[in-house]
Image (cartoon, grey):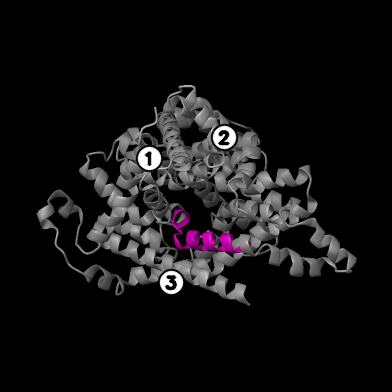
Amino acid sequence: MKSKWTPFLFIGPAVLLLIIFSFVPILIAFGISFTDTNLIGLANWSKINVIAFDNYADLFSDKKFLESIGNTIFYVIIGVPLAVGSSFMIAFFLNLIGSWLASTFRVIYYVPSVTNIVAIAVVWGFLYNQEYGLFNYLLSLVDIDKVPWLEDPLVAKLSLILLAVWKSNGVSMLIFLAALQAIPRVYYEAADIDGANRWQKLIKITIPSMSFATFFVTVTTLIGWLQFFEEPFVMTDGGPLNGTNSIALFIYQEGFQYNEFGYGAAASFILFAIIIVATLVQFKFRKSDQTL
Amino acid sequence: MTVGGLLVSLPFIWMVLSSFKTEREVLSIPPTLFPQDPTIEHYVHLFQNLNFDVYLINTLIIVACSMIGLFLNTMAGYGFGKFQFKGKEAWFIVVLLTMMLPGQVTMIPTYLLLNEMGLTNTMSGIILPGLIAAFNIFLIRQFMVTIPDDLIEAARLDGAGEFYIFTRIIIPLSMPILAVQVILTFIGAWNSFLWPLIVANDEALYTLSVGLALLQDQNVTNYGLQMAGSTFMVLPILIIFTIFQKYIIEGFNVSGIK
């Protein structure tokens, strides 16, 4: 029955599809990032020229690309601490109340992360509407002027961050909850005997015991925010004045709106490099804090 | 906590309530909380004038095909988890490598590849690239490793074929992990947006989310209609998720991310 080909029958279809649609594309992307492939080149391959590092050089003098990098850094600096912090707090409080009530709220907090991004954009677009939106109405009740949620480059960035944090809390919260529940109860009992208060228990027991979960959530959240795409894409399309454009959205625009495939592919490799560097830096930090 | 929960669900409550308001009431200031004279005109409009029935069928086709993808993922997970063969490590590394790639890197070349195959603007072009997910293979493999080898050997001695063993023994045993995968795959396929948007030029191939994005562009001020479209998109997920959330949340523990 079992021949040496049997395992390949099982892994074959999946591995083949992965190679065609994930592995080969990396090589193609790398290849075309050194060419001027665009819509014309696609129709007639002889029109494609190898231009070495020109795409990369152009990118670093492209104002729009540099702005996108700036915006992405802004998203990461504000968004990552906010997303990690808020999901930690939610998990911490859910763990404290621990009952059927907690499981109800767990569902409520998780729901946004399984919800369709377009539907979310449509609903939040309505909430953020400057004239008819609920948010500005609620603010007007306490005499605060209309906020240009999506009309001002800086405010729009913050509005998108708020929306993304709201949407992304669910998954990180579950990871934190699992970690919280894995902390042995005896630690707290010992601390009680020593007369520790709540705050001391949080600082000395809870947070240190969760260092792996925190590290995991921070790394994945950071990678996620570096690829920030859907929110600006469906809410603002990068505007106003390029104020919300991200690197990922820039790649999409070059590739599928302007059909500059080679240029877009080069930008995608810069993003890839940034992600690798950011991840490695975090692993480095983790190593050094463990040896302390 | 309660306040936080209310704040988180506010957009959903607002969405559902607004979808039953008349066009005029949606834009009234001060806004009303509950619709004064509830109407389902927006929902009727979605199906009669806006092809939401076509989008719904396309979305369901994608959901159905994603289940085939899940079956292939499960086969691969079993292959990697329970067989020894030459080059196993190397192939598994290939699988893991694809997991670490940002989607933006493969987006453009995958499109070019599909274009060469003549698959742009076809259902296959929408479905094929997303069929296999390395992360799911990885999770399923982790589970498969825990199944005792003796069980499989015993079945082989009884003369069961390899595929028979897989479908009759392995799959029933893997139900805890597969239940989670089915739900997450369903949610993912139901929500699929970017790739259908890139590959489909023809409105007959649009999915619900692409249709909803189109609706938002074309009916900028008709918020009642937009809210009805969103509700229609979100409600099935909310219902399925609420029923099965226990498995998903347990699944996070099964998969060992702690």
Type of amino acid under label 1: Ala
Secondary structure beneath disc 3?
A: helix
For the residue carrying disc 1, how many other residues have a C-alpha within 10 Å: few (<14), some (14-19), or many (20+)?
A: many
Q: Chain of mark 3?
A: A
Residue at horizontal 62 percent and vertical 60 percent from the top: A213
Q: Quadrant of residue B207?
A: top left
Q: Please name the residue that numbered disc 2 is placed on.
A: B179
Say what secondary structure mark 2 lies in: helix
Which residue has dot 3 on it?
A70
Q: Give the mark toward the camera: 2 or 1.
A: 1
Mark 3, Cα crowd under 10 Å, few <14 / some 14-19 / many 20+, is: some
Q: Earlier in the sequence, mark 1 or mark 3?
A: 1
Front of the two marks 1 and 3: 1
For image coordinates 60% across by 64% down, the residue present is A82
- Part of the protein shown in magenta: A214-232
In the image, farthest residue toward the left:
A46
Query: Where does the image place residue A54, in percent across and percent down from the top left?
Result: 22, 70
In the figure, is residue B88 to the left or right of A95?
left
- Where in the figure is residue B127, as x and y percent of width and height? 36, 37
Amino acid carrying mark 3 in the image: Gly
Residue identifier under label 1: A14
- Mark 3 touching mark 2, by CB under 8 A? no
Give the answer, above or below, for where A175 lies relative to A63.
above
Quick one: which residue is furthest to the top in this view? B159
The residue shown at (55%, 64%) is A79
Secondary structure category for the residue under label 1:
helix
In the rendering, which numbered label is found on residue A28? Answer: none
Task: Identify the chain of the residue marked 1, using the numbered disc in the image.
Answer: A
The chain to which mark 2 is attached is B
